[in-house]
Amino acid sequence: MLRYVTSALGLLMLALASPARPAEFSGELGSGAWYHVEIPDGWQPGDTLVLYQHGLDFTPPSNTPGLGPLRDVMLSEGYAVAATSYQERGWALFTAMDDNRDLLAKFEDIAGGAPGDVVPFGGSMGGLTALKLAEAEGFPPVKGVYALCPAAGGARLWDAGIDLRLAFDAVCGPDGAGAFPEGDPPMPWAMNLSDIPNGLNDLFDYADLIPVLVPLEQCTGISLPPALRNDAMQRRLDQLMAFAHVTDENFFVTNIAYATFALSDLVRAPEKLDGHNPFMTVGVDYSSDPEIAANILRIRPEPFAAEKLHEVSDFHGAVGSAKIISMHTSEDQLVVPGNEEFVADAVPGNQRTIAIVDEDSPTHCGFTDAEGLAGWEALRAWKDGAPQPDVADLQQACETLMTSDGIDGPCRFDPNAAVVPFDDIVRPRPAIAAGPPGHSRHVSPSATPRPARTRASQAMHGTAALER
């Protein structure tokens, strides 16, 4: 859900780079979103446009967005490329489709006509946005989608956020070891917007986050060397990381930042959920940690708020004839590889290739240059009539890029990748009964949890290889 695809792709300066400088346009739209358009020499209305989607950015839109890590390659291949900053910070799915429609209208005005088709491309939250563009109305045909580490679980990703936020209170609160600022009732666990620090942007920046996550530091000593943490700090840190299924301390800090700042913005911002609760912990099975199960706050959602969050966030797979390549890094601990279940469940097998890159240490979208380019070139050929690539094809293409073109590797596509099911990491929720708008309700923490299952807990279908 980050703005940046944290890979080594960078700006690939290939020998095939276009000799003519593309025409470049940028500015601010009436909505407050910023746009950026580049059109290569020779592009004509009816040609293809790539719509690049950035990941979650916590900075309010204020300047020209980037065009993604494959900008140079795409322009050299004759594609126009355009991007919007979105008009919202954070979880921007509430307006992202409209923002892209505005971007398309601006592009058509600049280019003197409409593209013949569009190819959405993005990573993290941008990967989900790219997928959702393929099923949105008001766009030219989508022939292909390139989704890297997509947050395809949609609204379900925020269940992990509320679980971690409330688990912090259950573990740290009884010891008086740390407490985040309480928000206005009936959602004390969501900070008021005025309590979210100004200037907070990159939720992966450990150095910037630690000074504003003082309660986390008090509870766990997260910024201290392990030898300087007292036993209680280390115990609480180990307990919370195990609960969140996170093994890397940097990822843990980022997940806490999402569970506090980004989650609070999601439920408090007037243009999002405007002070209404979409989350449920009543009936959720937390028995893997008896202490948390006994002490976690049990809350019931406002059904209309839950419905709204799912409506704007979930991917349903109504993509027409679009071809999708979706990839994931194997140890991603922010947008876990199990998100690919949602792509596999929603899209027929002959329209999606899902690939996992086998990494030794956790990254979020940490693809090498050769891996990222191999996926793009495979999609480009497939959408234009070539046979559907499989994971072995991606590995072979990646190796060829390394040996023949000198693109940086390594190549780590794993056709036999085993992915932990999404519901084994993000605890399933019971069904939410429909009801009128109302306030969030709290119940006793001792309420007996009931295990529940969702569609995503079923066996994965054809997801041996997942793409970020």
Image (tube, rainbow, N blue to C red):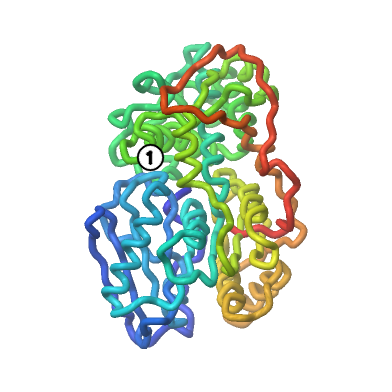
**Which x, y percent locates residue 9?**
50, 66
423 displayed left or right of 278: right
**Count of all numbered marks drawn on residues in the image:** 1
**Which x, y percent locates residue 432?**
57, 30
Q: Which of 160 and 270 is in front in this view?
A: 270
Secondary structure under badge 1? helix
Question: Is any atom of residue 28 visible in this view?
Answer: yes
Q: Which of 394 and 222 is in front in this view?
A: 394
Q: Quadrant of residue 248?
A: top right
Q: Nearer the viewer, residue 11 or 316?
A: 316
**Which x, y percent locates residue 200?**
34, 40
Residue at 73%, 50% (x, y): give it.
460
Residue at 43%, 64% (x, y): give it.
52
Residue at 69%, 35% (x, y): give it.
453
Image quarter where the C terminus lies is bottom right
90, above or below 462, in the image:
above
Q: Quadrant of residue 370?
A: bottom right
> Which residue in the protein does label 1 denote?
208
11, above or below 275, in the image:
below
Question: Is any atom of residue 406 visible in this view?
Answer: no
**Which x, y percent locates residue 167?**
55, 24
Residue at 28%, 37% (x, y): give it.
198
7 displayed left or right of 209: right
How many neighbours does mark 1 have within 10 angstroms: few (below 14), some (14-19), or many (20 or more)? some
At label 1, which amino acid type do we have? Answer: Asp
292, above or below 110, in the image:
above
